[in-house]
Image (tube, rainbow, N blue to C red):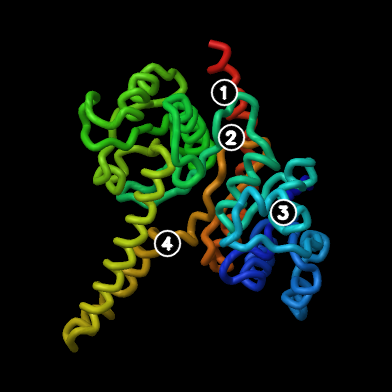
């Protein structure tokens, strides 16, 4: 069997390395198609693995004595810490030793490393970070949410093309609807970036462009691919998370406010758990950087073993569907027109 080989930054994240190691073991048990390289401090990783049952042929330790911390300047850290888990793991992808890189560690270092170490597909202007978010109708992909705060119109068109490829091939959404984030539905509305990008998206033959989407339309699932610069995308993601936490806290408080509400809470608990599961980030894995010469996936710093597991398994489908090759074909064709 040909494995999907994933280099996991074992030292990255709030709960590392235990969480990452446990997630890797769970992923191997669930998918026979994975081979995972735990990249990090060998002695520390071995302590985490002590006494645990796992397939030693499919879980391999790669020693990387240095760690890039979240507070470090990303560019300088990538340049100076060549023996860090992030740089070593990414170099394994660049050199073809692994198909994918996964990390819950420094977002900045992962974004810089993806562009500099792994490298962009020829013709791709910038690689966006593209997380899935839950909506009333299912899931939508936000492109970009953190990699490119300042973007040009041509970059947003590529985001739309790459996001469409991802949603169709990984999420199974046929002819995914693409919308650009705006402050109104009318074409003449928006800032300079949106106004310049809108006609380019309309003219792009590779996507199913439906026009502008307002913030309230995102939660309704009006578009499958949400296009925006990373500044706007990050605000949307953080607002989503904040409102979700507030609503959950308020609901719990209301259910515990009286004997009657406690009884009612017990009755609705099973249905509520099913609904909340749909909105849990751990169900969907991490956010890929699209447009690179290999797969780079960033997952939450506070990831649980379940989220690490799902992110690792996500890499298998990415390889099977040849997402990078499909993006390459679309971008090359667009450049030649």
Dot 3 alpha-carbon crowd within 10 angstroms: few under 14, some 14 to 19, many 20 or more? many
Marks 3/4 in contact by CB < 8 Å: the verdict is no
- For disc 2, the neighbor class at 10 Å (few under 14, some 14 to 19, many from 20) is many
Q: In terms of image quadrants, where is residue 125?
A: top right
Q: Is residue 195 above or below residue 111?
A: above
Q: Gap in Å between the C-alphas at discs 4 and 2?
A: 26 Å
Residue 280 numbered tag? 4
Label 3 vs 2, first from the N-terminus: 3
Mark 4 neighbour density, 10 Å: few (under 14) some (14–19) many (20 or more)? some
Q: Residue at x 63, y 69 (%)?
A: 16
Q: Are marks 4 and 2 in contact (CB under 8 Å)?
A: no
Q: Disc 4 or 2, which lies upstream in sequence? A: 4
Tag 2–tag 1 contact (CB < 8 Å): yes
Picture disc at residue 217: none
> Considering depth in this image, is 142 or 234 the residue closer to the camera?
234
Residue 264 in picture, x, y percent from top left: 21, 79
Counting from the top left corner in percent of width and height, residue 127 is at 55, 37
Please report the residue visible at 56 percent of the width from the left and 69 percent of the height from the top: 14
Please give the label number shown on residue 331: 1
For label 3, the SS is strand
Give the farthest residue toward the bottom. 259
Q: Which residue is mark 3?
A: 7
């Amino acid at each position: 069997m040909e494995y999907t080989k994933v280099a996991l930054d074992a030292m990255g994240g709030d709960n590392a390395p235990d969480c990452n190691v446990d997630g890797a073991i769970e992923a191997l048990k669930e998918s026979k198609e994975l081979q995972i390289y735990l990249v990090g401090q060998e002695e520390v990783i071995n302590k985490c693995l002590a006494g645990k049952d796992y397939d030693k042929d499919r879980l391999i330790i790669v020693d990387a004595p240095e760690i890039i911390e979240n507070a470090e300047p990303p560019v300088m850290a990538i340049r100076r810490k060549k023996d860090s888990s992030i740089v070593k793991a990414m170099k394994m992808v660049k050199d073809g030793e692994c198909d994918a890189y996964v990390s819950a560690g420094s977002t900045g270092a992962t974004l810089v490393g993806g562009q500099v170490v792994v490298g962009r597909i020829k013709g791709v202007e910038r690689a966006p970070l593209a997380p899935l978010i839950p909506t009333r109708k299912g899931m939508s992909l936000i492109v970009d949410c953190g990699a490119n705060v300042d973007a040009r119109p041509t970059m947003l068109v590529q985001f739309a093309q790459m996001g469409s490829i991802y949603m169709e091939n990984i999420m199974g959404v046929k002819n995914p609807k693409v919308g650009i984030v705006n402050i109104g539905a009318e074409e003449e509305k928006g800032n300079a970036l949106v106004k310049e990008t809108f006609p380019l998206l309309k003219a792009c033959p590779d996507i199913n462009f439906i026009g502008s989407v307002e913030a309230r339309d995102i939660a309704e699932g009006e578009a499958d691919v949400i296009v925006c610069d990373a500044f706007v995308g990050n605000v949307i993601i953080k607002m989503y998370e904040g409102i979700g936490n507030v609503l959950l806290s308020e609901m719990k408080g209301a259910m515990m406010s009286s004997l009657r509400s406690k009884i009612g809470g017990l009755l609705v608990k099973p249905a509520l758990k099913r609904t909340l599961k749909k909105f849990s980030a751990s169900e969907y894995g991490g956010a890929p950087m699209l447009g690179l010469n290999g797969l780079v996936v960033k997952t939450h710093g506070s990831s649980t073993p379940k989220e690490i597991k799902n992110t690792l398994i996500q890499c298998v489908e990415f390889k099977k569907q040849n997402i990078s090759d499909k993006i390459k074909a679309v971008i090359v064709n667009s450049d030649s027109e």
